[in-house]
Image: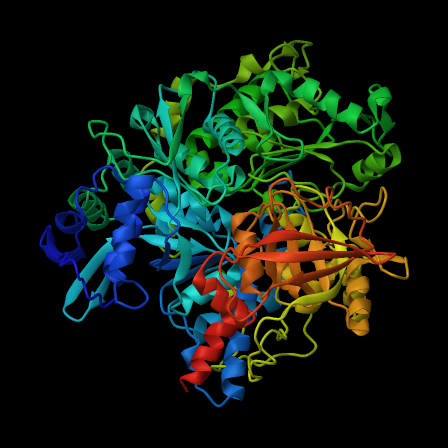
Amino acid sequence: MDSIDSLKTRSTLNVGDKTYQYYSLKEAEKKLGDLGRLPMSLKVLLENLLRWEDGSVVKEEDIQAVKQWLEKRSSDHEIQFRPARVLMQDFTGVPGIVDLAAMRAAMEKAGADPERINPLSPVDLVIDHSVMVDKFATGDAFRQNVEIEMERNHERYAFLRWGQKAFDNFSVVPPGTGICHQVNLEYLGKVVWQKQLGNDTVIYPDTLVGTDSHTTMINGLGILGWGVGGIEAEAAMLGQPVSMLLPEVIGFRLSGNLPEGTTATDLVLTVTQMLRKKGVVGKFVEFYGPGLDHLPLADRATISNMAPEYGATCGFFPVDQETLTYLKLSGRDEETIQLAEAYSKAQGLWRDSSQPEPTFTDSLELDLSEVRPSLAGPKRPQDRVALTDIRDSFELLMETSGKGNEKDKKVQVPGRDYTLSHGDVVIAAITSCTNTSNPSVMLAAGLLAKKAVEKGLRRKPWVKSSLAPGSKVVTDYYDHAGLSQYLNELGFNLVGYGCTTCIGNSGPLPEDVSAAIAEGDLIASSVLSGNRNFEGRVHGEIKANWLASPPLVVAFALAGTTRINMAEDPLGTNDQGEKIYLRDIWPTEKEVAETVAMIDGDMYRKEYAEVFKGDETWQSIEVREGKTYAWNDESTYVKKPPFFDDIDKPLEPPKDITGARILALFGDSITTDHISPAGAIKADSPAGKYLQEHGIEPRDFNSYGSRRGNHEVMMRGTFANIRIRNQMLDGVEGGYTRHVPSGEQMAIYDAAMRYADEGTPLVVIAGKEYGTGSSRDWAAKGTNLLGVRAVIAESFERIHRSNLLGMGILPLQFQPGENRESLGLTGDEVISVEGLSDDLKPGEKLTLKVEREGDVTSEVKVICRIDTANEIVYYRNGGILHYVLRSMIGEG
């Protein structure tokens, strides 16, 4: 951070009795001209460039490019961004630390110092993705689920304990503590970061990248951050900048106030739908306008959290008075609060309604008073449905699924006195950082539960209900408000502090319910307060999944069905025969506000006082010592990956792809859940067979997410989602393909291995929005290990495109008007890509050759989606980590 500071911006700021150094945007204005109308998010990027200017990686022309952005409101200029810190969760964190351990092994093999592989900036890993809802609706569910989690994941956790000892700047938040994004919002985030350089304390905006796409939640606190693949995050830890184009910034103007009866969840589903329609993939979204004056920070965080769902890199809210209010509420110390205010005001990063509105690339507006109660589903978070239309929406789903004539179908549940029908809710989960970080919607759920119990309503017996908050503070304020007992009476007992249902860790359905769904081939429903409802994610047996606010989750558990109009139909009948409606138990805005007012900073301070300590089981895990990891060949959780085995071989220039076969042919919206599922491992899948061959019984499979430290499992699980559809096969669901030219149908993994034996390179063809969803690096790593050289799609989601490049896979994009259908692709073709040379340039057009039987060949131009010069270097090296490792070995 030793800037040459060509614009002479280094300045002094006194706060309280301390003096700080900072790089002043106001001083930069003296050379660059007025920056007042620059979006706040771009001001943060500008400060980063001023602080890291070295004349080589960051030059004065990069700084000038930010000013020039104002003229065109966009830019094609590449910059290098260095975040202050990195955030990880355990599903992506374990393979990340596995990679670092493998890099240390490669350094040692090459005769270099392995301890050079070490995070240079702070890294926090929060274990939140592993707890499953095995036990529910019992007072002992939390204890039992944590015990099962610790037993299942002991080997993974022991590996993380080794990493905690072996690496500097690396902290682990143990299991049973909270969800990474909520912990980040409530505790880790500082707004202003500081670093000691000699005798000076330099302060700068708190920024980060994270290995989970919902890292964007922290933007609600005025902290710029977004999700990257684990591969990019590892490179950032090791000192590599994040290479990016100066983004377009879409302004989202908010006005008015939310009406009575609506929640932050209803607001975010509306915003998500609007922004998906607008098209903001790869862009920043920045919120502004008078509506922010009355929008609580928890509501802002809910909106920022869903940025991956509306496709943006981030959804940024500038620092203002509400930011300070939240810092105080969440127990931050006075120095942190004072510094956030003083620095933001000194830098022009402070928002108030008297300021002129910034200049944006484009903008759109929402009057908050127009928001209505909503859900999203049944398959995508951007498909908002008004609460009053949920029944009609489900009936339409039945029609399109060919079950329109089964509306009255009932299946007897074995051994029970009730039946199941299409649309019945079999999972109702209050889960996910998106909503459990928001006291207003969480307390609304508790108040609704209280009123429901008092009215004599009960949860329907076929509903698997659960409460999984993102931090222990939630249970504190539930207990303090006297609401826990009512949630417990309705089966919403605490099951764990973690992502649970939102990441697919729903646990098994009761056997009798599962049997009835299978017998009737029913379209069952789940309702969860999460952020993702993609096919096959929540639970393999549930085909309709709906996102909703926590109070609506409780309401649907009472109703037991999604074939209901809650404005007209009763939720149920009590023992006195009274019909009880949603309006009878919905808490008023005044009741919610009065209950929220009970929360104070002491609750947060108490729960975060020993956030890194963990319970006795965590502390008792034996920690292996050593600067390199002692790999266990018998392990089925943690294995040394093969990515760096050939790191000592000389580099070859990029070669054309010739004679490739199509491994799979996909349509639109193929998500990272489709490419690399996180949920259950089927016993008859390639991954399931591998585990059984290694002595693991199906009951002990755990999940794909928990096995991400073992490349043998993950490559077998690539494209193994039970709902994925390969268009090379007619009417077949699941991870299958057709081997060409034999014509045999087989698992995608098995076909890839046969092609490898035959020496045949592979490509994947897809439609729009390839790689939507989680920042799942195994979606790229697995694709690499299957032998895929290129993915050719109509468009890519930002993180997955970057991940593919990070693993040396070429992302190619069809030109407008061209796609797999216009080319008439069936999967039988031979594919070649020409134009890959040593002077390959970002965005260059390459030639795609398609050869068919009978010597019929067609050619089209495709766009090389290597977007920056840095990415060209990474691609030539076989990936970003390969480049870092070669550089370090070369330096000795």
Query: Is 822 positioned to the left or the right of 449 in the image?
Result: right
Choose between 838 and 493: the one closer to the eye. Answer: 838
The N terminus sits in image quarter: bottom left
Q: Is 641 above or below relative to 71?
A: below
Q: Is residue 391 left or right of residue 648?
A: right
Q: Position of residue 397 (x, y in %)?
A: 74, 26
In the rendered image, is residue 320 in sight? yes
Q: Residue at x 58, y 84 (%)?
A: 649
Q: Position of residue 442 (x, y in %)?
A: 48, 32
Rendering coords of residue 702 (x, y %):
69, 58
- Position of residue 511 relative to residue 233, above or below, is above
47 relative to 71, above or below: below
Is residue 258 shown to the viewer in this render? no
Q: As rendered, which of 483 and 710 lies closer to the eye?
A: 710
Q: Quadrant of residue 804?
A: bottom right
Check the picture and name the quadrant holding the C terminus.
bottom left
Q: How many marks?
A: 0
Q: Using residue 256 as the reference point, say whether residue 728 is left or right of it.
A: right
484 vs 550, nearest the viewer = 550
Residue 671 drawn at (x, y percent): 64, 46
Q: Image point 24% across, 49% down: which residue?
A: 333
Residue closer to the observer: 762 or 407: 762
Task: Please give left or right for residue 407 compared with residue 452 in the image.
Answer: right
